[in-house]
Image: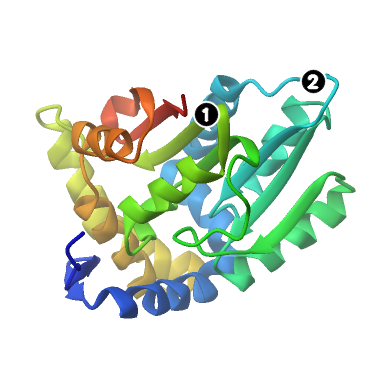
Amino acid sequence: MSEVNSTSFGFREVDPGAKQGLVNDVFHRVANRYDVMNDVMSGGLHRLWKDAMVSRLAPPRSGRRPFKVLDMAGGTGDIAFRIHDRSAGHAEITVADINGSMLEVGRDRAEKRGLKGLTFTEANAEELPWEASTFDAYTIAFGIRNVPRIEVALKEAYRVLKPGGRFFCLEFSAVDTPFVDKVYDLYSFHLVPVMGRLVAKDEDSYRYLVESIRRFPNQERFKAMIEAAGFSRVTYTNMTMGVVALHVGVKI
């Protein structure tokens, strides 16, 4: 496999080895206001998108063995808490994130809710510390576009899933509806950074997050990347006219 000489950090091209540190700085700065900003930016829609992903996952509420889920880049616990509730506590959920500040927010939230069966682990999506065929499901929401080498992270997701295990990725995607795409660009590039400055006291981080959305592969290209990692029966479902897409694949 040829070596990648650069990768995107927003609209900038950077060395692949430098991107993770830059991304870490962004999420260290916004961790404490991250969930509040999600509500502000999406008008609360991110809650519906996440609910839809967990509904599609449909974790079992009982069984002879726990349903093991790896929620990658899930530091603040938003997806993990939904899975916990949907499974009535039956799921055994590992929340993994490369950013310790995000994980700290998630741990605090879990303790306040008195939730059991959740493990918070600092881990790199490109080099997961678990053995092959460990998990029944792998979820990642609004995190994979921040990974320096997405194709490596996808192969790692495939490796740690059991045969029959499912991959779920919720991510901002490409709006291709005439006029709507123009309105979306206006909102993203002009209003979101201002919201970041007013709510999270960090305009630059939210400017990067908007730019990272535009650099992420569209629905079909990302579907092809998931298939290249080894997954079968890969599908995607657009939400809110393609603002977000849910990609699902199965390890056969």
- In the rendered image, residue 78, in percent from the top left (x then y), is placed at 63, 45
Q: Which mark is residue 61?
A: 2
Relative to 65, is 161 above or below? below
Q: Is residue 116 left or right of residue 141?
A: right
Q: Residue at x 55, y 58 (%)?
A: 128
Q: Nearer the viewer, residue 68 or 220?
A: 68
Secondary structure state at the residue bearing disc 2: loop
Tell me if residue 76 can be seen. Answer: no
Q: Which mark is residue 166?
A: 1
Q: Nearer the viewer, residue 191 or 177?
A: 177
Between disc 2 and disc 1, the foreground one is 1
Which image quarter holds the N terminus? Answer: bottom left
Q: Nearer the viewer, residue 24 or 185?
A: 24
Assess whether mark 1 and mark 2 are in contact (beta carbons under 8 angstroms). no
Relative to 186, is 223 above or below? above
- In the rendered image, residue 245, in percent from the top left (x then y), is placed at 35, 32
The amino acid type found where label 2 is placed reads Arg
Q: Residue at x 48, y 58 (%)?
A: 125
- In the rendered image, residue 189, in percent from the top left (x then y), is placed at 22, 57
Secondary structure state at the residue bearing disc 1: strand
> Please, which residue is most extreme toward the left here?
178
Quadrant of res 89: top right
Label 2 – label 1 distance at C-alpha? 17 Å
Category of crowding for the residue at label 2, using alpha-carbon neighbours closer than 10 angstroms: few (below 14), some (14–19), many (at least 20): some
Is tag 2's residue or tag 1's residue first in the polypeptide sequence? 2
Relative to 87, is 37 above or below? below
Quadrant of res 82: top right
Q: Is residue 134 left or right of residue 53?
A: right
